[in-house]
Image: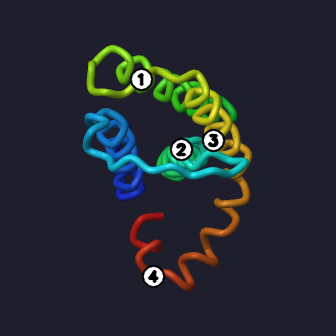
Amino acid sequence: MKLSRAHIPAIIWTILIGSSCLVPAATFRSFSFDSLIQVDKLIHLILYLLFVLFWALAIPSSKKNTLILLITGVSYGILIEILQGSMHLGRSYELDDIIANTIGAILGVISIRFVKRKIPFLKKYLPFVSKLY
């Protein structure tokens, strides 16, 4: 596979997820947030939704690639959680995070067509997008 400019955001986002999820927990200040939706789970959902979308824009469209992308997104989320639980960084394995990651990946797959249809609009109003896609 030949790398294109469209791969840059996807690769950077993948590295961002891995690096931010595997830094020691002490790096982050503790905070509490009482609401119906936990901010942490929402962040996981958004991370994996964007993971799928960035990669979907970087690879050729097909049902097979979409399925592979979904499996890759879910697997990457599971791998990160397993690493968090085993690397003794003050982080822990959380099934709820895997669920949020999976929902984000699924929503990303569902959003692919919509986002691809909006690329011309984005190119019109955000000139840097035309350099990537």
**Helix or strand or loop: what does disc 4 sit on?**
helix
**Helix or strand or loop: what does disc 3 sit on?**
helix
Q: Which residue is mark 2?
A: 40
Give the vertical position of 102 relative to 114 (above or below): above
**In which quadrant of the rendered view does residue 125 lie?**
bottom right
Compute the Cα span from label 3 to label 4: 27 Å
Q: What number of labels is visible?
A: 4
**In which quadrant of the rendered view does residue 120 lie?**
bottom right
Q: Which mark is residue 114?
A: none
Q: Which residue is mark 1?
A: 92
Looking at numbered disc 4 in the image, what kind of residue is underneath it? Pro
Residue at (50, 51) in percent of width and height: 54
Could you say which is closer to the camera, residue 100 or residue 107? 100
Looking at numbered disc 1 in the image, what kind of residue is underneath it? Ser
Compute the Cα span from label 1 to label 3: 20 Å
Of tags 2 and 4, which is closer to the observer? 2
